[in-house]
Amino acid sequence: MYEATVVGRPLDESDLIQRAKRGDKHAYEELVHAYQGIAFRTAYVIAGNGADAEEAAQDGFVKAWRALGRFRTGAPFRPWLLQIVANEARNRRRSAGRRMQLAVRAAAQEPSGGAAPSPEATLLSGELRQRLVAAVNNLSEDQRTVISLRYFVGLSEQETAEALGLPTGTVKSRTARALEQLRESYD
Amino acid sequence: MTELERALVALGGELDFPPAPDLVPAVRARLERRRFGRPLVFAVALLLIAFGIAMAVPEARSAILRFLHIGAVTVERVETLPAALERPLVAGLGPALPRRLAEQRAQVPIVLPQLAGPAPTRYYAQPGLIATLLRYRGKPVLLAELPNDQLGIGKKIAAPETKVEPVQIGRFGIWLTGGKHVLIWQLSTGETRQIETRLAGNVLIWLVGDRTFRLEGDLAKSQMLALAREITR
């Protein structure tokens, strides 16, 4: 099952990057460990299936290692890495007709027993959750990819633009149109 | 952030995404392998040259080339073929399975991308080997995929009439055509099973990444290469 872990920037990330640039594989493994979750989810949203996403993320990490010499010291590592992974995932997206269908985990649909629901869960009770999933699934593939990267994976607008190879303005307008369409189902 | 956007963020935590795999061991292995990458490329280049010379000289063909290891497959040239029967393409591979079940049984995920035409429905699995029955240009073609860390799981025994030539695909590829050749799958249980004799089965074997691909069917070399390039594009 997917675990929604928060991926923060470790305090010593720049140190790990410097060590990795000097050929320290152990330092690079720590970076892989820190970013593998978000890399896989980014690839999954773009490639549309788990097997391709795993390959894309793995290939992305290997290519990023080879390209580390070109990585600008002091630049944010995450968008740079995700751009490489997303590019691999785009190469594996096999056909326009093959769309990932989002679904809610079974556990999330069950009542939480005696425990008080979290504020997020309160936002998404019962029918509303299902309506929203259906509405996201009904978006065009381009819109759904942007929404998934922005809200489900947690990328910034800039990171989403870099991952998809689009201008930031396109991501912004695509997001706005998709939200407008989703609002009809949500309200 | 609007209420809708907050609801989407909350929904993201409840979606049934596949579990994120631990990529560290695989990435580590690939980085370690890369240390030997250049010598390997050099060795393959030398092998290719030597192979070309051997194939160009008939006497050398029999004298020099007795064995050729290509990924998980070994090609052995012999004067006299062992006794074998003519069998269908999928003989010995067990029952046809749905893709997911075949992948589980073989413990080898299929690389095969979506190709033009109807999607394949018949998959076959043995430990360390997964096969897909395709139709290409109206003819049945069997694609077998084998991880490279199983030296000699597939063994091809070729008679002198069989032409074996290197081809440009993946890291290294060979094309076998003409004459009889016998295929033996060496299963991971240690059991050896001889599957079939082919009178005119053309075979393309090639390496991409850590995997050996083997295509077999009644196709011309150019057709087989075109299909192979679609598979591992």
Image (cartoon, coloured by chain):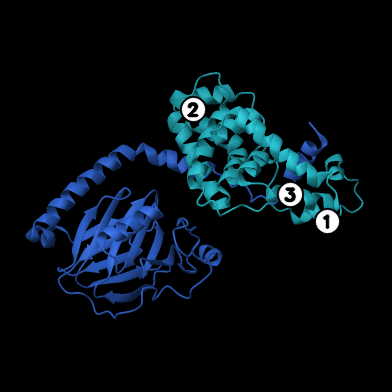
Q: Position of residue B9 (x, y in %)?
A: 75, 39
Q: Tell me the element at label 2.
A: helix
- Cα distance in 3D space between marks 2 and 1: 45 Å
Q: B118 or B185, which lies in front?
A: B118
Residue name at image x 78 percent, y 53 percent? A130
Mark pair 2, 3: CA separation: 43 Å
| Residue at numbered disc 1 | A110
Chain B takes which shade in the image?
A: blue
Q: Nearer the viewer, mark 2 or mark 1?
A: 1
Question: Of the residues shown, which amino acid type is indicated by label 2?
Answer: Ala
- Chain A shade in the render: cyan
Seen from this angle, which residue lies furthest top?
A74
Left of A29 or right of it: where is A110? right
Is residue B148 shown to the viewer in this render? no
Residue at which label 2 appears: A20
N-term-proximal mark, 2 vs 1: 2
Q: Pick the residue in front: A119 or A97.
A: A97
Residue at 11% across, 60% down: B63
Q: Which residue is mark 3?
A: A135
Give the percent coordinates (x, y) of residue B107. Answer: 50, 61
Q: What amino acid type should be assigned to the residue bearing mark 1?
A: Glu
Between label 2 and label 3, give the one nearer the viewer: 3
Instruction: Determine the secondary structure under disc 1.
Output: loop
Mark 3: which amino acid?
Answer: Ala
> Separation of disc 1 and disc 3 at Cα?
21 Å
| Discs 1 and 3 share one subunit | yes
Q: Earlier in the sequence, mark 1 or mark 3?
A: 1
